[in-house]
Image: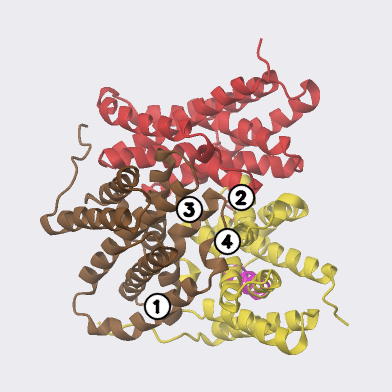
Chain colours: A red, B yellow, C brown
Amino acid sequence: MLGSSPDFLYIAGLLGVIVFAISGALAAAEKHLDILGFILFAAITGIGGGTVRDLILGVDVFWVTDALYLQVCVAAGVLTYFLAPQFVARQRLLLWMDAMGLALFSVLGTSKAYALGVDLLVACAMGMITTTFGSVIRDILSDREPVLLGPEIYVTAALAGAMSYLLLFHVLGDSGVSIAIAVVIAFAVRAAAMVWDLRLPKFSRY
Amino acid sequence: MLGSSPDFLYIAGLLGVIVFAISGALAAAEKHLDILGFILFAAITGIGGGTVRDLILGVDVFWVTDALYLQVCVAAGVLTYFLAPQFVARQRLLLWMDAMGLALFSVLGTSKAYALGVDLLVACAMGMITTTFGSVIRDILSDREPVLLGPEIYVTAALAGAMSYLLLFHVLGDSGVSIAIAVVIAFAVRAAAMVWDLRLPKFSRY
Amino acid sequence: MLGSSPDFLYIAGLLGVIVFAISGALAAAEKHLDILGFILFAAITGIGGGTVRDLILGVDVFWVTDALYLQVCVAAGVLTYFLAPQFVARQRLLLWMDAMGLALFSVLGTSKAYALGVDLLVACAMGMITTTFGSVIRDILSDREPVLLGPEIYVTAALAGAMSYLLLFHVLGDSGVSIAIAVVIAFAVRAAAMVWDLRLPKFSRY
């Protein structure tokens, strides 16, 4: 059974960094960058959101005290550089990696903030920041419309993850189970949006 | 009479967040975003500048310890989403909201920094950061020319507010009156620039 | 002989801020901004990277405690505003100023971080952040392709500076000599890339 052991959280966090780093490196492939560009995009996308979260929460930035996160980003950048040509559907893969990262980061970011005793709304905001800042910087640097502004259900999925976690925390306690269920919910919402092309009503009353 | 009571500063700060948040939500209306996009733009514009100021000053980020700021941004985003169609001149309204936010934030940001004992120039810089970062992020995300780079008197007005406050502080002391007068000066400079289309000479000696 | 005295580091740091500030002001000239725009671009480019480095390292932001850095940026912005028309090859000058800043900041940023006891890879990352954030913000604000994403050897040169310093540190110790040699190496790599138009192989296997 899953406990809320530090190990479980640590591995889930690393996994989030890895999938976001790969999505960043795949964006570098679209831009035809060199290998350092791949590493750079992998690092910015993988650790950017968590960096802003930690700065705002006033805690030590996670990758400064534990270099493994940065090593993982470098590895993701290098491996993607050599393996990307193998993938026929890179754009599609980027979206699925991004969806997995979204699910993990929205829940883990919310959970880290809430454990520090902030308000529920602030904890949700931290989940959103962890999820979106890395990919927003990736998209601005690669001159793409930030995925967060697209018509797709993106922030909604992250919010579903954050809110499910906070609800489950009060029902089940701060356990790995609460986190795992919330991650699955966030991923399911985003996946449904991608597969069936769902979107919220846009503002169009001009 | 106005005292420099925490209450007066607190309410002025909230007011600044509200008008900037509305200007952000109106920018989301221009982009035809969904309701979460409105909330996001409201929050980034409303609290972005103060967040960067607090991080650089090394103090607790204001909205992490007091969730009311974030609640106000959410409310501004939601209300603007439903009320924006009522406004026939949204673009104009955005500029006036932005001018009010500019006047409040340039003075309050300078005042908060100066109270921590930094140099006059650094205090001015903090006023500028508080004023401009939120709207710069809003403009970059919505792919508009940052208002700060436009030919209009924008930074000049913020600077007028910051410098008036520092001058008044040394003449009248750290009172609500110093703040109120400086806010009026900054607003008057920006309003004059908007109404009469004033601008500083541009660099054009090519 | 050069010692690793605080004075030497302090002057090298100021020099880095000055050349980056001038490169920022020259970018403002390209955009035909007014004099405040020049100051703003000078300040963002001159102190932006070091600000992000200090925030992530969790130390006091360097220019908040010592206003000289900001004064130097203001002076660089004002002087460039009046002198820029004298320079026939402003675009070229911007690139050389940027190269000098790159060499200084990549080494000094790495050195500051490493002195705080972080991992080698994290120290390198801090050197890259110090070098690149200011110019990335300058380029995004002025709507240019970030130099960091260009095909030129830019990050490579910064990395050469960071890695040379870390190597020399372990051979020669934390002396001014280690810093000076590493700065020369970083500058030489960037200069060679500019003069002979060198570049790393791009990812182009579509």
Q: Is residue A31 left or right of residue C127?
A: left
The residue where tag 3 is placed is C53
Q: Is residue C117 above or below residue B32?
A: above
Name the mark nearer the viewer: 2 or 3: 3
Q: Residue at x 50, y 86 (%)?
A: B198
Q: Nearer the viewer, mark 3 or mark 1?
A: 3
The disc at residue C77 is 1
Chain of the residue where label 2 is placed in the rendered structure: B
Residue that carries the numbered disc 2 in the rendered image: B40
x and y, in percent, of residue B3 in the image:
85, 78
**Front one among C163 and C37:** C163
* Three-letter amino acid code at the position of disc 4: Gly
Residue at (73% x, 53% y) in the render: B75
The residue closer to the viewer here, A53 or B60, is B60
Main secondary structure of the magenta stretch: helix
Question: Distance of mark 4 from mark 2, alpha carbons?
Answer: 12 Å
Q: Give the residues drawn in magenta, as a range.
A: B90-104
